[in-house]
Image (tube, rainbow, N blue to C red):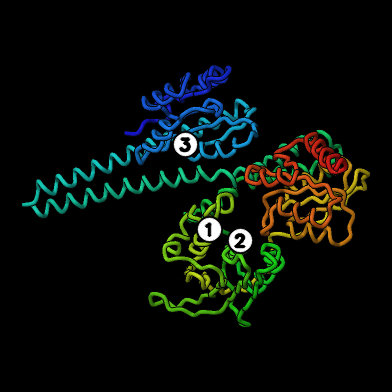
Amino acid sequence: MAQSEDQLEPVIVFAPVGRDAAASVGLLSRSGIAAKACGDIQGLLAALQAGAAAAFIAEEALFGQDASLLFKWVADQPPWSDLPFILLTSRQEQTGIEAWRQRLVDSLRNVSLLERPVQALTLVSTIQSALRARARQLELRGLLEERELAAQELEKQVILRTQELKAANEALRDQMTVRAHVEEKLRQAQKIEAIGQLTGGVAHDFNNLLMVISGGLEMLDRQTDPARRKRLMDGMRQAAERGSGLTRQLLAFSRRQELQPQTIDLARQIGGMRELLDRSLRGDVHVTLEFSPDLWPVEVDASELELVVLNLAVNARDAMPRGGTIEIRAENVPLFDQGVAKDFVRLSVSDNGSGMTREVQARVFEPFFTTKDIGKGSGLGLAQVHGFVQQSGGKIDIESEVGRGTKITLMLPRSSKEPGPDQHHLVDMHVARRRPASAGSVLLVEDDDEVAALVSEMLEDLGFQVVRAATAAAALGALANGRRIDLVFSDIMMPGGMNGVELAKEIRARRMDLPILLTSGYSEVAKQAADAQGIRILRKPYQLAELSEALRGAISKHDAN
């Protein structure tokens, strides 16, 4: 059977330079984690062969070392095993170090990177996460062993009871039930492990929430105005409530989230998304809307419907790198299903892009399956669409041909009620106009309303006037209308097809005189691109003093140039 987490083998620490090894072993021991230090690479390999739950390695310990035997050990692990490695990196930037580090990460496979200096809490938390992942691997091993034993027992029963056909058939059915149960456990364990890998986007979203809460707490101490204190408290409360919403996409494919269906006029609801769709797509991608004049109302969750349409439009955009047309159509379809007349509205989103192979079509609704590059897609978009349609009592279908494009059709149930009033839409541009200030005017580009409200308070407390835009397209529009802007402060990860780094590049092409500061809760993806342009990234969550210092630095660096 699989070991429980408190029975795991020790964490191997390989940091022979300085006191890192002793300090790390002591820290882990105080946290209740068994740890063992190795003095050289041969000792590391021997410890791994003897049994380890994870390995914590300082990268300088492998500089100039022949690690081929270590890499061979990693590659030769059994199918159930993928030992977690935590690699402590430095800020060294010598020629070739990045390429060497990438080869090291590729060879070790299951790697988490920590950069010096690292806090004790961060180190312990990362290793605890690795231990949980290892425990799941050991559970998988136990399940595989159980499945193998079940298969062997099944074969034995068939051989022994050939003459007793009826009894043998009963035994066969029993064994198949056990086997299906074990395989279902295996799939669930794999799903849990896959969720654990989805760290990038979740880190960004949670750091946004932490930004609102930690920054709001700091600003509360600086505010005496009851109205402003109430706004800060409301923002922190909303951030805490939104934390639960981060699980919505993960739950959508399992059909467990609670929807709030209401009667919707599709033409009015999706027509009201025109500006959002235009901002979310590139200039070479055009959207056409075609709705039947007598279109029936449907019974769905309005907010989820907009997310579904946006997901499908963004996927269609990504399938047309050279531009094209997205066609959104809706028409009435009376159906006859299992002897019962059912009326549906057929909503389809079509593109003339690259299309999909049959293999990809068979998997597009699987959670975490994506054909996009790392950092550009979680693989949850179409799974969420599928879950939404199923929960809404509808059906979904996909037609695609390589080189000809893709059409995704949603069959949404007709509602017998009258549509309600217009719904709130997802993204809008907002200009914050408050008390006059003397430090200058900042264009704040942030799609998260709660974060934007808090950062506006912080900027105003520092003496800045704030103009807020929710997307990169809206920010470029604000710069083009003649309004005075002294600095652009933009989030990196945003909807709309243009991230913060791309926005900064476009702004510099138009206005070289404008200082730019970027921020993100998950900056690693864009760090290299930002460094290449000489733009600083302020990591979320940040305090007021850190924001002030970063703004001054961006302005003074720009003035010096």
Disc marking residue 546: none
Q: Residue at x 76, y 35 (%)?
A: 543
Asked which secondary structure carries label 2, the reply is helix
Residue 320 in which image quadrant: bottom right
Name the residue type under label 3. Leu
Determine whether, in the image, residue 379 is placed left or right of residue 505: left
Q: Give the label, 3 or 1, closer to the camera.
A: 3
Disc marking residue 307: 2
Q: Is residue 492 visible?
A: yes
Rate crowding at label 2 as few (under 14), some (14 to 19) or many (20 or more) other CA atoms within 10 Å.
Answer: some
Q: Give the label, 3 or 2, closer to the camera.
A: 3
Q: Are marks 2 and 1 in contact (CB under 8 Å)?
A: yes
Q: Position of residue 277 (x, y in %)?
A: 67, 66
Rate crowding at label 3 as few (under 14), some (14 to 19) or many (20 or more) other CA atoms within 10 Å.
Answer: many
The extreme bottom residue here reads 293
Determine whether, in the image, residue 7 is placed left or right of residue 435: left
Pick whichever, 150 or 99, lies toward us. Answer: 99
Q: Is residue 46 above or below residue 71?
A: above
Q: Is residue 288 above or below residue 275?
A: below
Q: How far apart are the alpha carbons under marks 3 and 2? A: 38 Å
Q: How far apart are the alpha carbons under marks 2 and 1? A: 9 Å
Asked which secondary structure carries label 1, the reply is helix
Disc marking residue 108: 3
Q: Position of residue 240 (x, y in %)?
A: 66, 43
Asked which secondary structure carries label 3, the reply is helix
What residue sits right under mark 1 in the picture?
Answer: 384
Determine whether, in the image, residue 513 is placed left or right of residue 33: right
Quarter of the image with the N terminus in it: top left
